[in-house]
Amino acid sequence: MTREVVLGIDFGTSYTSAGALVGDRVELVQDNGDSVLPSVVYVPDRGAIEVGRRAAIRQLTDPSGVVRSVKRVLGLPPSSELMRRYAAGAAFKVDTSGERTLFKLRSGEYAPEQIAAWVLVRIRELAEQRFGGMIRKAVLTMSAAPPAGYRDAVIRAARIAHLEVLEIISEPIAGAIALGVHGQVAERRLVVCDFGGGTFDVSAVVQSGLRFSPVATFGDPYLGGDDFDAAIAEGIAGTIHRSSGYDLHRDTVRWSELLFRCENAKRQLSTSTEAPFVMREAYVQAGQTRDLNLMLDRRWVEARWQELIDRAGIVIAELMRRSGWRPNDVDQVVMIGGTSLIPMFRRLVAGLFTPAKLLASVQADVAVAIGATLLTARFGADRRDVPVLDMAS
């Protein structure tokens, strides 16, 4: 390498992405041609730990060794309600009896920070393959309103992954920068909707020149893409139970596969009105295993999502109350995060604000990583035209 590379990393609930500045360009880290890495870790009885797509596939055969969505509980105290909810849905034992939470997997006990560190190690290794040489510095992002212990926990995870955290920035601001709102000196009011895999955060931000100042933030820490997957799964499981009496919740392997396939269907339904759904040996009826071979209709799925969309609307309404803004006061609405690609959510936002004010991107799932990467320029030799973040970082 001719110069030290600083990574911009979006450590996400469902997916992690990262990039680096190469000249004036943002180049994203690639995992077999994909710019997002599933934030999934597989810890086997023995042998090498797997991270990313290989780990995600293990949900189909060995879910008790798979840890997903660890960001949702990073930094939370063991006694918190969110930790209890996470533990209830895990395929492995989550020990919350002590001063810190431990995931009890077959090969040992691990703190959430250790699991997060393996994801960061993998993204660092992929970056080193892409850019050449050792990488030891990064700018990380976090949600607009993270749990009190999240910042320290993610810094500990980065240290375990041999990464020095130069700065931690707000995900909504990073996403807004990625969509180019910093590209022109302006005086305007922004609402940034960051809808990721685990959380929905909204921020009211004032841009003055190149300075970005938050006015208010609000969010739902347990509303994200994972919940949309689960809503489809619950709908399918309910149909199976009514027809056969079989309860998919009782079968860890089948339930994990159902969630896995529901996520794929959700992604297809962002661009299509129908999605094929096939799952072999999905349930048992009259002593015989049965396959599922369905065509999921977007309208049927959206009926299962209505409660989640209503919750998103409540979050936006509360942000507007806290900011003291009315919809007509807002100059631009920025939508980032993979869940923001869901058409039903976009219709919600368009109904609350003037559609012409909406700013979105087909790269919504990597917008935060792009913004974080652009902000790594703050630590380079040329610091011209770098946005100023008027907030604690």
Image (cartoon, rainbow, N blue to C red):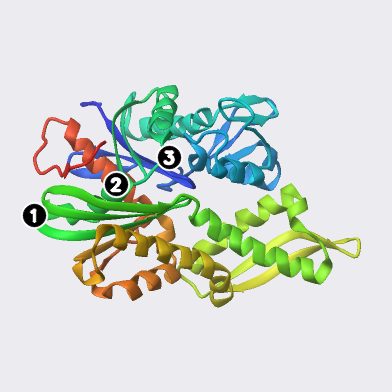
Q: Residue 164: name its quadrant.
A: top left
Circle 2 Cα neighbour tier, 10 Å, few/some/many (<14 / 14–19 / ≥20): many
Place of residue 38 in the rendered image (x, y in percent of width and height, measured from the top left): 50, 44
- At a point 36% along the width and 50% down the height, the residue shown is 366
Q: Nearer the viewer, residue 369 or 47?
A: 369
Residue 185's disc is 1
The residue mark sitting in front, 3 or 2, is 3
Q: Earlier in the sequence, mark 1 or mark 2?
A: 1
Q: Residue at x 26, y 75 (%)?
A: 354
The secondary structure type at the circle numbered 1 is loop
Image vertical order of residue 256 relative to residue 232, above or below: above
**How far from the left and from the top, in percent, is residue 345?**
42, 67
Amino acid at pointer 1: Val
Q: CA distance from mark 3 to mark 1?
A: 33 Å
Question: What residue is at 66 percent from the left and 30 percent from the top?
Answer: 104
Picture coordinates of residue 51, whole percent (x, y): 53, 36
In the image, residue 255 sits, relative to residue 55, either above or below, namely below
